[in-house]
Image (cartoon, grey):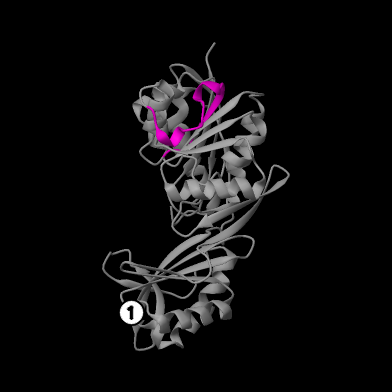
Amino acid sequence: MYVLDYGAQLQYKKKEVLTLLAPFGVADLEVFESPQSHYRARAEFRIWHDDAGAHYAMGGMDKKSTVIIESCPKVIETIAKSMPLLLEAINLSPQLKQRLFSVEFLATTAGEALITLIYHKKLDESWLQEAQLLGEKIKAYIMGRSRNQKKVLTREYVTEELAVDSRLYRYRHYESGFTQPNPFENIKMIEWVIIQAKKIGSGDLLESYCGLGNFTIPLSRYFDKVLATEISKRSIQAALENCQLNGVENIAFVRLSSEEMTQALRGVRDFNRLKGIDLQNYDFSAVLVDPPRAGLDETTIELISKIEHILYISCNPHTLASDLEALTETHAVMESAIFDQFPHTPHIESGVFLRKKK
């Protein structure tokens, strides 16, 4: 993959996904390419210390050596500009440099950066003072982490702004929460899902693995009501805040796993977390799932197979193909696409839109 030019990489990925989806009637798929550089909005680097000071570093291909990083063309411009400024400031401050183990960057296309410094030492008042000056100097939000310590100097999130479907959406991305790594491909993914949603026409939307509302909030324009579930407390908190930021009022976010969502909708169990939500009041015309690499569990597949339209976003085309073996017993694949979230790697993000067979 590393030795191929970018066009050849995309063709290789397209061929791989088509091979997996061909048994389900997929003859072609849309390909959404990424910028070839400056596309990652999140990055983590080890810090290597030697007589010359502190350096960004990563493990070598042999798993034993250390490679010093002078620059990183993968990260978005906001991070690329912050990296040398941060390292220079760290090397000028013994307090910031001492026992610094790694650095994490979370940034936005709107220019905000949150930088987390991770240490093998206790973070005391003198560190806080130095870190405060650092944030002011490089114009970034600074956090510190050490064993049993988390120091937030100003705030622990950045606010991304995405122009989607002729509207501007704002999202709070938290330091410890899941976010889509490539904002440019993320916009294309959301708009592709919206194009499919417009074909559905009406009804309510069920979403599992909703995260911080990345898809949920723009999609809510095209449905009467939305019930969205996610297991992470932090993601649910962010989703509720993002609803307020965007003035959306027709979404109910609930902290449930995919399995618990299935139990609730079947009436197998009652959940206090669903207090005030009348599940009988929903008429789901579509479901959106964006599961982890392992794909969907059997009970979720059985549940969503009863819904007219299925939107499936996948980070693993192999488990997508496995799940389609069951889903295409009741549904037909109408549209399919790949989104190159991770250029220059073998990883592939896919999307399929299914409609219930007559």
What secondary structure is found at the residue carrying circle 1? loop
Give the quarter of the image for residue 260: top left
Up/down of 86 relative to 231, above or below: below
Asked whether 346 or 51 is in front, the reply is: 51
Which sits in the foreground, 47 or 212?
Answer: 212
> Does residue 214 belong to the magenta stretch?
no
Closest to the observer, 233 or 96? 233
The residue at the point 55 percent across, 22 percent down is: 281
Judging by the rendered image, the residue that carries numbered circle 1 is 99
**View extreme (top): residue:** 358
Residue in the picture at 34% in, 81% down: 49
The region drawn magenta spans: 270-291
Write the residue at 41% across / 27% down: 264
Q: Is residue 296 visible?
A: no
Q: Quadrant of the C terminus?
A: top right
Seen in the picture, residue 42 relative to 98 is either above or below; the reply is above
Residue type beneath disc 1: Arg
Residue 224 screen position, x and y as percent: 64, 28
Image coordinates of residue 15 in percent, x first then y, are: 48, 37
272 over 135 or under it: above or below: above
Task: Give the total number of marks visible in the rendering.
Answer: 1
Task: Return the x and y of residue 322 as percentages of the image width and height.
Answer: 37, 29
Give 85 or 286, whichever is nearer the viewer.
286
**Residue 286 placement: quadrant:** top right
Q: Residues within 10 Å of mark 1 (few under 14, many from 20)?
A: some
The reply to whether the magenta stretch includes residue 286 is yes
